[in-house]
Amino acid sequence: MADESASGPNDAGRRAFGELEGDVLAVLWSEDHPLTPGEIHDALGSELAYTTVATVLARLHEKGLVDRVKDGRSHRYWATAGEADVASASFRSVLTRSHDRRALLQGFVQSLSTDDEAVLESLLADARRSRRSRGS
């Protein structure tokens, strides 16, 4: 059975799997102080229910991606993981579950812009040099 939470071509208006968590984290990353669910809800500027934002925050807390402190009847949240760390872990998770890693990587590489390709080539060269200097 297909993952019903993943957006497809016929899912106009639906968020892609994990997109709401990413949107909430992006709000937290954009601020230099902890936010309440209400502040995050307002920053998202969408038609989401407040309870949806609160649920996403609770899930992110369970995953260790945000921390919180009690503030009255609510909590204030802040991200404990950086954007690059979250994206890297997410990509590694997808790659690990893939039955065809080559096809997955090929699709990713083909979707890159010319500028992104240049960055990727530079990062791969750096990684190779680092491995050689460690004697791996």
Image (spheres, rainbow, N blue to C red):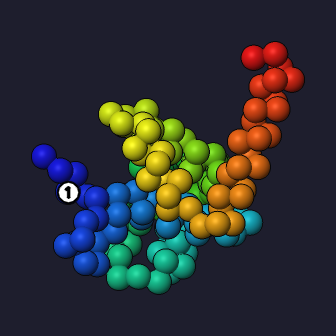
Amino acid carrying mark 1 in the image: Glu
Could you tell me residue 66's position as x and y percent? 57, 50
> Are there few (<14), some (14-19), or many (20+) residues within 10 Å of tag 1?
few
Could you tell me residue 81's position as x and y percent? 64, 48
Residue 30 falls left or right of residue 13? right
Identify the residue at the far right of this view: 133
Decide: is 32 above or below 96. below
Q: Which quadrant holds residue 131?
A: top right
Q: Can residue 34 be seen in this view?
A: no
Residue drawn at point x = 35 percent, y = 76 percent:
48
Could you tell me residue 118's position as x and y percent? 71, 58
Q: Camera-side residue: 48 or 35? A: 48
Give the number of marks: 1
Residue 97 falls left or right of residue 111? left
Residue drawn at point x = 77 percent, y = 41 percent:
125
Could you tell me residue 37's position as x and y percent? 49, 67
